[in-house]
Image (tube, helix red, strand yellow):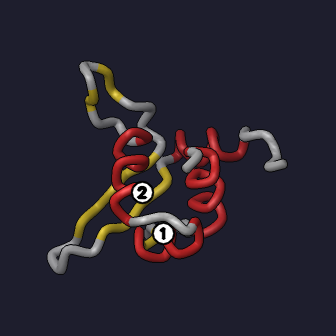
Amino acid sequence: MAEHALLRLLLELDEGRGVALARLAKRLDERVSVLLREGTALSDAVIGGEAGPGWVRLVCDDAGRWTAHLTPAGREAARQLPAPP
């Protein structure tokens, strides 16, 4: 799955409250586990000794439900993406 698709969808759906990963998975026709990996790579997590860009913040609530939030830097990055083909 392309990170661009995730960023575009978050830009469309995230109104400051985050978006459930289950909803994103359904819209993108992906598994939640794939979105967790992609979201982690787009977050500020350190992977392989390098921090990610900090565009996405992932949150797990007490019930185990994951939500993705677009950070201000992520919102700007998503706005600058080229139009999809």
Report whether 67 appears left or right of 13.
left
- The residue lying toward the viewer, choosing from 18 and 47, is 47
Question: Nearer the N terminus, badge 2 or badge 1?
Answer: 1
Q: Which residue is mark 2?
A: 35
**Residue 64: % across, % down:** 20, 74
Q: Is residue 69 left or right of residue 62?
A: right
- Of residue 64 and residue 57, the one placed in the foreground of this image is 64
Measured along the vertical axis of the image, is residue 32 above or below residue 2?
below
Residue at the outermost top position: 49
Quadrant of the image occupied by residue 9? bottom right
User: Which residue in the structure is indicated by mark 1?
Assistant: 25
> How many marks do you count on the picture?
2
Local SS, label 2: helix
Q: Residue at x 48, y 42 (%)?
A: 55
In the rendered structure, are the residues bearing label 2 and label 1 in contact, judged by CB atoms less than 8 Å apart?
yes
SS state under label 1? helix
Work out whether residue 45 or residue 72 is closer to the camera in this orientation and state it: 45
